[in-house]
Amino acid sequence: MCLRKFGLLPFFLLPFALLTAVLTLGTCGLEDYPFIYPVPQGNITQTLNYRAEVRVPNNNNGNPAFSHFAVFYRIYVSDSLQPSTTTETFSAINTVLASNYNSVSGYIDSITQVNTNMDTFFRGLGGQGTGQGVGYNYLALNEANIDNVLSSSVLGSTIVFDFPLNASGGLLPTMTIGANVYTLQRSDNNGTFTPRPDYNFVNNQDLYDPQYLNTQFNADVVDKTGIQPGVTHYTYAAMFIVAVGSDTNTYNYIYSTPSLIGVFLLPDP
């Protein structure tokens, strides 16, 4: 804080102390409250249920508080095939998806809901009971550190997320920046759970099998109640992007407000 403690002063010095306090407050600018810019929601374009383009602005360039961007994701089981995943179809996909989005939506492009700890917020979007998982997790990449990939080098670039119709022939969901293509991978939250059947974003039966929808295995997956036996299962991944940085005075993490990248249909194997 910029306010100083003046202690006990003689009465005749109080006006000077108050004047000093006012002048001191006048010098307190935004630099005392580190701020990093988000990706505006208007900079993101989603195509149906399989592709999104994120145009990253350059306004964090030279910002000493900025470190990198992070992507939070969660997978939702569904019995509904939605060619276009918009806010109008979230409830049909999975009511938990709709509820989670409603919780996030108040922060998107907000100018008042700033400096919220997005790590705590997104991880806290888990539910109680079997099949609700532990909330959102950090997106990972195959054979690449996503924090390094989404660092200041992406400022002013376009990030493209692609989810193929099926994963045959080795096709897997990817993130592309310029000429660099990265395969998306699920998190294990530093080894606290083991994704089944693997780390790929693929609609495999083990992914939505109720016996694995727990905090030991598929803690990043949310079940859908009421799916009848024999009905085709689909899975969707919701992804949000935030900017991450640190307070140069306290070294605590700080976050921008989030934006929805999209809700993607996972390909069949």
Image (spheres, rainbow, N blue to C red):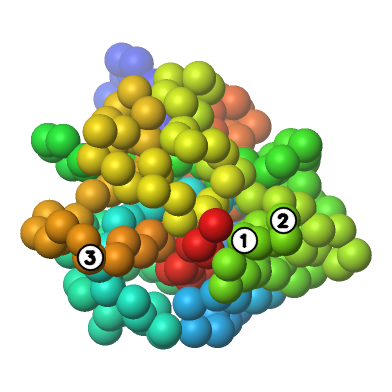
**Residue located 46% across and 68% down the image:** 265
**Residue located 49% across and 84% down the image:** 48
Per the model, the C-alpha gap separating discs 2 and 1 is 6 Å
Q: Which of marks 1 and 3 is nearer the N terminus?
A: 1
Per the model, the C-alpha gap separating discs 1 and 3 is 21 Å
Instruction: Give the residue furthest to the front.
Output: 230
Mark 1 surroundings within 10 Å by alpha-carbon count, few (fewer than 14), some (14 through 19), many (20 or more) = some
On the picture, is 134 further left or further right than 184? left
**Where in the figure is residue 27, as x and y percent of width and height?**
57, 47
**Where in the figure is residue 261, as x and y percent of width and height?**
52, 67
**Between residues 105 and 77, which one lies in front from this camera angle?**
77
Judged from the image, the secondary structure of the residue bearing numbered disc 1 is: loop
What amino acid does circle 3 point to?
A: Val
**Between residues 34 and 217, which one lies in front from this camera angle?**
217
**Residue located 54% across and 37% down the image:** 198
Per the model, the C-alpha gap separating discs 2 and 3 is 26 Å
Quadrant position of the C terminus in the picture? bottom right
Residue beneath disc 1: 167
**Where in the figure is residue 225, as x and y percent of width and height?**
12, 55
Residue beneath disc 2: 170
